[in-house]
Amino acid sequence: RTDVRKMKVFLLCSVFAVLQCDCDTKPPLHKYLKCCFVSREEIISPLDVVQRLYRASVGKKTSTKDFGVRAHFEKFMQESWHEVPSLNTVKRLEDLKPGSLVRFRCMLQNLFNPEFYVGALTGRNAETNETFHCTSKYQDTLPECVDELPDLTDMAVARAMWERQPAHCIAVPGESEWVDAFLEQE
């Protein structure tokens, strides 16, 4: 049985999450798989999909903090539910790739106080000095596109402060193992 309490999991919707591990290395096939199975980029590197959706929304000047992430992943999950690994049935956590999309069934036990974070950031390409936009939504750390901490005294950064609601999830109390097997067959 997998001990979900040892992992950081960020909810994107009510049915899926991004697996965050303390490991800094990506699997060696990560880039290759991303190129070969573009339609499955949502599973292999969902945070890259979030960045792409955010950059597209910045170009359109949309003001929503969701920028189409929920709709995109809900559509993906309707089509590819069983392709996303389940934390409820995985035998070894080592089998899951860091940063990949996972799903799990749990009971929401507690909501913590809201967290405020800088959601919209500007990165700079060191070689070309070109600036670009990125987001830290669904992440515990600054995204790779940002080299330095944002200046929190800057009013533009202050307007980019977003809020999220952390939650504590536990295994469904009293759930038998046959329930996992039954739900995986559906």
Image (spheres, helix red, strand yellow):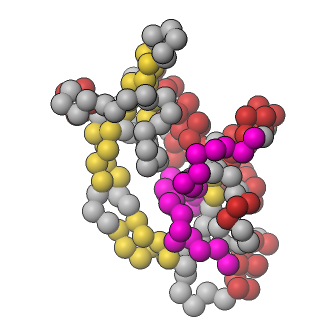
In the image, taking residue 141 as reference, residue 79 lies left or right, namely right
Q: Position of residue 10 (x, y in %)?
A: 49, 56
Asked whether the viewer can see residue 33, the reply is yes
Indicate the quadrant where residue 105 lies: bottom right
Residue at position x 43%, y 39% in the image: 142
Q: Residue furthest top?
A: 128
Whether 18 is drawn above or below 40: the answer is: below
Magenta stretch holds residue 27: yes
Q: Main secondary structure of the magenta part?
A: loop
Residue at position x 37%, y 73% in the image: 110
Q: Which residues are magenta?
A: 1-28
- Screen quadrant of the C terminus: bottom right
Residue at position x 61%, y 87% in the image: 175
Residue at position x 57%, y 90% in the image: 174
Indicate the quadrant where residue 48 lies: top right
Looking at this view, is 124 or 103 the one in front? 124
Asked whether the viewer can see residue 67, the reply is no
Whether 55 is drawn above or below 110: the answer is: above
Q: Position of residue 115 (x, y in %)?
A: 30, 53
Q: Position of residue 95 (x, y in %)?
A: 74, 60
